[in-house]
Structures are given as C-alpha cells and as structure tokens.
Amino acid sequence: GVAMARRTSRLQHAARLKMAQHVRQQLAVDTLQLWAPLSFRVGTSAQIPELEVYSYVLLFPRAFGTFIDWYGAVKPLARRVLADFRSDLEIRMRQDRVLSKLVGRVTVQSRLKSSPSAFKKMVKGAKRAQQLHDLLGIRIIVHNRHATNEEAALWRIYAIIMRMKGWEVNSRRTKDYITRPKPGGYQSLHLTVQHRKSAFKVEAQLRSVRMHNTAEFGSASHAKYKALLLPKQILNDND
C-alpha cells in the first residue's frame, strides 16, 4: 500500500512538473503495465483507478481531458436511463407468470462503467466514446427452482427484454455462451439493448447462480488485471 501511494505521488508530481516528455511517458507506461497489475495481485486494487487516471493524464492529456468532459456531461442522464431500464425490467420479471414458475427469485446488479475503465476500453478498441457498448451494464442472476430450468429461465428473461418498449435488442451483439461456453467453463447469455430516444446502450448478462459462481470464483474467474495494451508509437518512443 505504501509503495502504491508513493507511485501515485510520483504521477501527481510528474503531471505538475516540467520534466522531459519521454520521462513522463515512461513513468506512465511502467505504471499501467507493471504497477497497476501488481496492485491487483497484492490486493490493493482500490488504488488502481487513481494510478490509471494520472497515467492517462501523462500519456493522453488532450484525449483524456476531452473524454472526461464528455463523461461528466453524459453521466447524469446515463444513470437515469440505466435506473429506468432496471426498474422496468424488474417489474416485468415480477409480473411474468412463466418466469415465476421457473425461478425462486432474481438478483439484479447494475453499474455505470468508471471513467478510467471506460477510457481504457475506448483506447483498447480504438473506439469513440459514443461507440462504447458496455458503458452501462446490468447483470441478472436467476435462482432456479430446479437445475433443469436454468436455460429456460434465462431465455425467458431474454424474451421479456425483447418486448420492452423504448428499447431495441441488437441481435448482432447477442452472444450465447451457455450452449457454447468460453474456455474455462464461463457461461452466460450476453446481449446489448439500445434506448431508442437517448441512444444509450446497456450490456446485459443473464446467468444462473451456478454460472455466476463459476464466473466469479471458479475456473472461469476474471481474477486477472487487464492491463492496457498501449499503442506501439508510445512504446517505441520509450525504448
């Protein structure tokens, strides 16, 4: 924790002091590719967003500044859109008689991607901010009455989402990892829905409790920090 705090302090000073550009960039590159993953491994991941933010300020001062302005402007509306989607979906699931016969209860989790996480995704995919499909996310975990009802319950929720007014499912981005699991056994049904009025997109993950436990704690766990693969131009400039 002390080492990470010192690293953060160095990044803060580098952003304020007039040091050579290649020194500033090297400090940021080392932070993103060495210190941030290390922070994750030693259990101090709460410091990662701060490390990432100061690194982005050093590496992409204009692009990150523009992105933060955009993120701050859309954040209030994005939260309202996500809250409305979640509320409408929860009501529809409670009222669905078919679903109630398949599951005992449903757990719903939602999140707005943090600014450093969203910027990382944008850089990695060479996308514009408006092209981020997972800025808003929702995860639906079903507690089945019987193990044999897993897939039926998830596809029932998919059908409920398809019928939601004001939203459109992007069928090209629907990914069935239930019948075709990822390496490691990861299973989930992914889909992207777009709000017709605001154009905001929500990435939805539908899974059973068993699938969720495998994804979060089992062989398919994402217990690995996804370091930003920086553009070759930056890396070459710091060789």
Image: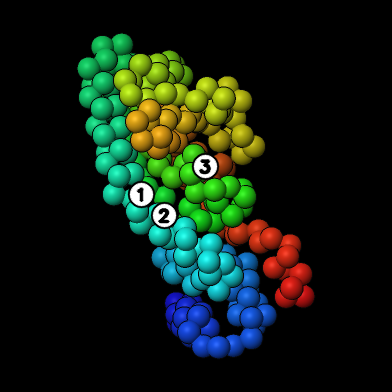
Q: Is disc 3 surrounded by few (<14), some (14 to 19) or many (20+) residues within 10 Å?
A: few
Residue 72 image position (x, y, % from top left):
35, 57
Residue 210 in view of the camera: no
Residue that mark 3 sits on? 131
Using the image, determine if residue 67 lies above or below residue 101.
below
Residue at 31% from the left image edge and 16% from the top image edge: 99
Q: Which mark is residue 70?
A: 2
Residue at 40% from the left image edge and 37% from the top image edge: 200
Residue 12 in view of the camera: yes
Name the N-terminal-most of marks 1 and 3: 1
Q: Which quadrant does the N terminus fall into?
A: bottom left
Asked which secondary structure carries label 2, the reply is helix
Q: On the rendered structure, is 98 left or right of 24?
A: left
Using the image, determine if residue 226 lies above or below residue 185.
below
Q: CA distance from mark 2 to mark 1?
A: 6 Å
Residue 29 image position (x, y, % from top left):
63, 71
Q: Quadrant of residue 220?
A: top right
Q: Is disc 1 surrounded by few (<14), some (14 to 19) or many (20+) residues within 10 Å?
A: few
Residue 49 image position (x, y, % from top left):
45, 64
Q: Which mark is residue 220?
A: none
Residue at 48% from the left image edge and 52% from the top image edge: 118
> Which residue sits furthest bottom?
18
Residue 215 image position (x, y, % from top left):
50, 40
Q: Nearer the viewer, residue 115 or 50?
A: 115
Residue that mark 1 sits on? 74
Three-letter residue code for mark 3: Gln
Q: Nearer the viewer, residue 59 or 8?
A: 59
Name the N-terminal-most of marks 3 and 2: 2
Q: Which quadrant does the C terminus fall into?
A: bottom right
Q: CA distance from mark 1 to mark 3?
A: 14 Å
Three-letter residue code for mark 2: Trp
